[in-house]
Structure formats: C-alpha cells, structure tokens
Amino acid sequence: MNKQMLTGNVAAAWGARLAGIDYLPAFPISPQTEIIETVAEWIDTGVMDATMTTLDSEHSMLTAAGGAAATGVRVFTATSSQGLLYGMEMMYALAGWRVPLVLINVSRGLGAPITLEPDHNDVLAARDSGFLQLHCSTCQEILDSILIAFRLAEDKRIRLPVLVNLDGFYLSYTREPVIIPEPKEARDFVGPYDPGTVRFKADAPISEAVAVLGGEAYSYFRYEVQVAARKALEVYEEIAAEFQAAFGRSYDKIDAYRADGAEYLFLMIGSFATKAMDAVDQLRAAGWKIGLLRPRLLRPFPDRDLRILAAGRKGIAVVDQNLSFGRGGILHTEVTSSLYGQPGAPPVIAGFVGGLGGRDIAAEEFYQMAEDLKKACRKGVQPPMRLLYTAGELTAMRKLQTIAHAVRPEGGRDEKH
Amino acid sequence: MKSIDSSFQRPRDLPDIHILSSGTSICAGCGGLQAIHEILDILGLKTVTVNASGCMSLLSVYPFTPFSGSWLYTAMASAPAGAQGVRDALDRLLAKKRISSDEDMQVVVLSGDGSATGIGLSATSGAIDRRLDFIYICYDNEGYGNTGQQFSAGTPHGARTTTSRGEHGYCGYKKDLFSIWKANHPAYLATVSGAEPLDLARKIEKAKSIKGPSLIIAFSPCPTGWHFPPQESIEIGKLAIRTGVWPLKEYEDGKVVHTYMPARRLPVTEYLKKQGRFAHLFHPGNEYLIKEMQAELDAYWACVEKSVKSSETKE
C-alpha cells in the first residue's frame, strides 16, 4: 500500500494525476497554488502526461476549461476565494454548457477585508451555479472525492461540472497520511473519457451555448439542469458504492458521526467538522446523547438522507462558517427548509455562525452551542442566530486598536463618536 | 492593392460558395455581417467560432444557426480564453491520435470592438503572450452596437452615441487596437472592409496560412447605430477607405504595410456627412472638430507616405 504524508493540495494534485486528466488550465491564487505547482512539476519532469496552460485570470481559466471540455478532453482546474468569484460568470455558463469537468476550490474568506484564511462564503456563492458540490474534511477524502467527482460529472445521466471543496490552510497546508490508490485501479475506476455528444469535430459541426429567445426555451434548458442535478443523488450512491468496493473507503452523502441514539446533532461541513467530532466525543463522555452530521454532498442537497438522519431528534445545531449578511448562516437556511414539515423533524434547528476567516471554533464553544441547543429544546422555541465571538477576542481587538491609535466607532461606518 | 502570392487576383477569383446562410436576425445593411460572410467564405468549413457577447451572438439562436462550422458562445470578456481551451484540446486530441488531422479545425474568435478593445483585452493579451494559433475577427462598429450604440473604446472622436449626446459628441479617441497587438509581436494583423472583398480575401488567406495569433479588424458600418440608410453600407465602407479614415493595412514579420494608398484622398466631410452620428459636426461652432479630424488624417497619411518613400529609397 502506498501511504504518504500529503498536504490537502498535494492530495488534490494526486487526484488529478490518478484520474488521468488531459488538461489543466490554471491561474495562481493562495491557498490553491500548490496544486498547480505540483501538477506543473509532474508534467515538466515527465511523470504526468497532460497539457497545462496558465491563463490571464480565473474567468479566462474557467472559459478555457469549458472550451477544452466541450472539445472532448478530461479537464481539471483549481481556484480559491476571490478567484472563484472572479470566474463566477463562467461557473454558471459551464453548468449550462453541460461540460463534465472537475474544479477544486480551496476555501478562503472573501474580501473585504481581504484575508487568506478559510471560510465557506466563497464556495457557497457558487451554490446556485449548477456545479455539483462535494465537501471534504480530510486529505484522504480530497483525493478520493476527485476520483468520484470525475465519475459523477461524466456520467451520461448527469453531465454537469463538479466542484470539490477543501478548506484553505486547515486542509490545503496540513499533512495527513493519505493512501494513494494504485494508478491502474484508479484508472479502471474513473474509466476513459467519453465526450459524448458534447464535442467539436470538423466532420460533425455543432453549435454550443447558443442564445435563446424567450422564457420557454430558457426554462427548458434550466429545468434540464435541475433534473440532472437531482438525478445525481442516486448516481452518487452508485458511484460511492463502487468506490467502496474498489478501495474499501465509504463516502455517504452525509457523514454521520456517533449519531446513533443521539438526541442532539451538530451539523457542519468541511475540516472544522473534525473539531466537532472531538467535541462530540467529549460530550458523549460527559453523558450527552449527541452526534454530528457532515453533509459531503451539498449540491444536489441530500434532502432524503438528512430527513432520515434527523428524524426523531430533539434538535440540531447548524454551525455555519459563512454569513449571508442580513440573514445568517446559509446551511441553516438549507437545513431548515429541507426539514420543515417533515415527519419527525426536530422542532429546534439552532443557527450558529463561526470560524470566519480561519477563526478557530474552540471545544468550549461547541459545549456552549450544545447547551444553547438543549435549552432551546427544553423551551421548544427556535433560538435567535448566534455569532461566535468571545469577550476575550473583542478585548484583544480593542487593545490592538488602542495601541495603533485606531480606536473607531463600532457598527455603522458613518456613526459619529 | 496587389498581392502576387495570393490566389485572389481578380474579383472572379473570389469563392462563389457562401458558407454563412441567410435568415439571421442581424440588422439590414450590417457591414459587420457582410465582412463576416466574406471572411468565412475564405476560411472554409472547418472552423470553430468562439464568440464573445455582442451583435453577432444573435447569429446562432436556438435551435438555428447560419454556420456550417462549429460555434461556441462564451462571455463578453473571455472568448480568446475559450479559443485557447478549444485549441489546446484539439492539439491534445491530435497528439494522442484521438482525432485525425483532417478532423482538425481553424479556431476563430468573433467579437465586436467593445470586447476587443475593452473587457476582452486581458484575455486577448494572454492569448497573444501564449502564441495561441487562432484568428481573432473583430467587427468594428465603433460602439456597443448590440445594446443600442453606446460609446466604446472603439468609438471615434466626436461621434454621437446614446451615451455621448452632447454637442461635441464623444470626447474620447478611438483606441488603436492594431498597435496594441503589434506591440506584442503577433503572427499577423490586418484591417479589412467588406467593401473591398479582394483585399479582404487576400488577408484572410494569409491569416489562415500563418500559425500563431492573428487579428483581423473589419470595418463594420452600422445603419442603426451610425444612422444611415441600410443600402448605403457599402458606399460608406468605400468612403471610409477613400477619405483615409479606414486605412487598409497589414502587419507581418515586424513590418506594417498599407495595402491601399489612396492617391487623392477625399475630404473627410464626404464620409462624415453621410452619417447621422456626425451630423452635429456640421453645426456652427463645431467646424474645429472637422478641421481637427482632417488634420489628424493628413498627418497619419503623411507619415505613411514618408515611410513608404524611405523604404523605397533603401531598396
């Protein structure tokens, strides 16, 4: 068995290498850059046979990715944060082109203020683009998810681009032991690239991504994407089962941790869910009946799986590492709307926002969230959304401002002293 | 306007096939469409046209297309990047013998001046840096035509557009796309006009034969945006050349050659007076604008003539 200590980024590069990609259009951005550097080195040293082209921007990078995929080759690309937003126009376009490529997003908070550290506002901004989304919490899962993602994207019933998400720093730069599948086994699992009907050929001219006039034609194609995206729930199950048979690792749509017999559940995505696992262990040891749900598949949203896993619980604490200003956590909205009115749905779904821009979520905060949840369940009232921030953090911020003579009115920017 | 190497010596040498079919929703008298017709006839059937948002995005409207080759609509900013992806994929397929060489295609970008001189310039610049083997066709109708002729970086000084309605028209100056490309050593550059089909055919023939990034800027009289009757489109194309407003030129091997030297240039007013967008220039108080335009044209051509003479004496 080939087991190595790999960063999340290098694990992602291995995923691309084992999937036998033809083409990598690239543009550097932290904390993703190590992925393209790794692939570039493999290509330059002849270890890997693929074409890599550095474009002038992520918008161009995604356009080139779509153009190549529409011409009939297997395409892999990667970005982060501002880059994902810069290319966002093409995210929507590529889903409409029905090109089956795989895009890695290494999550990083969005400016302003500009930052390098992670949260999920970037990837969730792509939520409605038509890209399917897989969210990872370990380096092994990154590599494995890329192999699964190519199968999912290229499946005849789907033909949609897939985004695989990993957290910047916490996964991108963290080394973990990763089992690297045998190249032949990986290639057998992913299979050769079949461009299907999406392909430019001199003897079979085709017009792609053409304009439509009128809502009827527009709706026709948009609904088609919806049908394909929903179909992916079932197709994902088949592919994950095949993956498990081939490699022995299982990837459910929602990863449930110590959820058996749990009255309360945390619900999180990404690498910080491993912090929640630790908190669950501690709380369980203290007598709590608590577990964790970690959706891996966010698009399509695994409603049925969530409803089954949530049924009969007293409450769920949704911990969002993102913030939809003026509303709250995005996952909280998704979970609530998925469970509303469902038989056995937990009466309380509490929303917490934390871990923005790489801010830690401490064990004590998980305990506090569990307490909040329990209290709300006892009252039977949905609690208001809570933003995680400690008095200590606020004191430290104000101290810093004092030292820098940058004391400011807090809140609205136009407030006078 | 002679080119010894060209297979297009006389009008009868021009192809009698017409690749782009009729019945599109493009405006009557569109000079851009005329040029595209002529260009495609030379390029042939094996093309992938990668389109940036603009008037011509309405050529292919589901489920109809006038193209005999393939078509990919991208976005306003990134058609050259789309062309890069298509070219890279074709090269990969050829290298891996997944397609045969007769399945290969000429990759063409089709955009207006709004994309070519503005929002698409970054993607274009990248494609030139990478020596992308493609032909960029810019139909230059000197404004954002598809949205109703707002001024773009391609709008000439003094022209009235829907966003420059003041008494002096557009206060900016037309961006020199030719020189921007030239500074980055492309494979081939040319300006063309649908009103001069022989000159156009020779240039497209050349662009097709040269590997690397090529740009064709096609003069595109726009009846709806420039305000003239559709039937005068070709006449305006001819006047642009005869007044020297639209120099026909090409760049190759580090040298710019004017493929047509107007022996006795007509006054610029002959060109201006035909178009509603310049009507205000003839109002009292705006004489200086016409004078400036004429002076600028005279200076340009004096410079061209000087360089032609000096290269003749060298030879």
Image: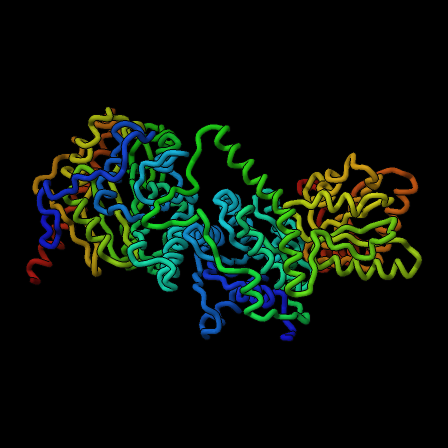
Is A215 or A153 nearer to us in this picture? Answer: A153
Q: Residue at x 51, y 36 (%)?
A: A221
Residue A281 shown left or right of residue A162 in the figure: right
Q: Tell me residue A124's x, y (percent).
A: 63, 47
Q: Quadrant of the C terminus of chain A?
A: top right
Q: In which quarter of the image is the N terminus of chain A?
A: bottom right
Q: Tell me residue B2's x, y (percent).
A: 9, 49
Is A152 or A287 nearer to us in this picture? Answer: A152
Residue A208 visible somewhere in the drawing: yes
Count of marks overlaid on the render: 0
Is A307 or B112 nearer to us in this picture? Answer: A307
Residue A129 falls in which quadrant of the image? top right
Residue A417 visible somewhere in the drawing: no
Residue A76 shown left or right of residue B268 in the figure: right
Is A25 or A142 nearer to us in this picture? Answer: A142
Placement of A216 over or under B113, stated as above or below = above
Q: Residue at x 22, y 49 (%)?
A: B190
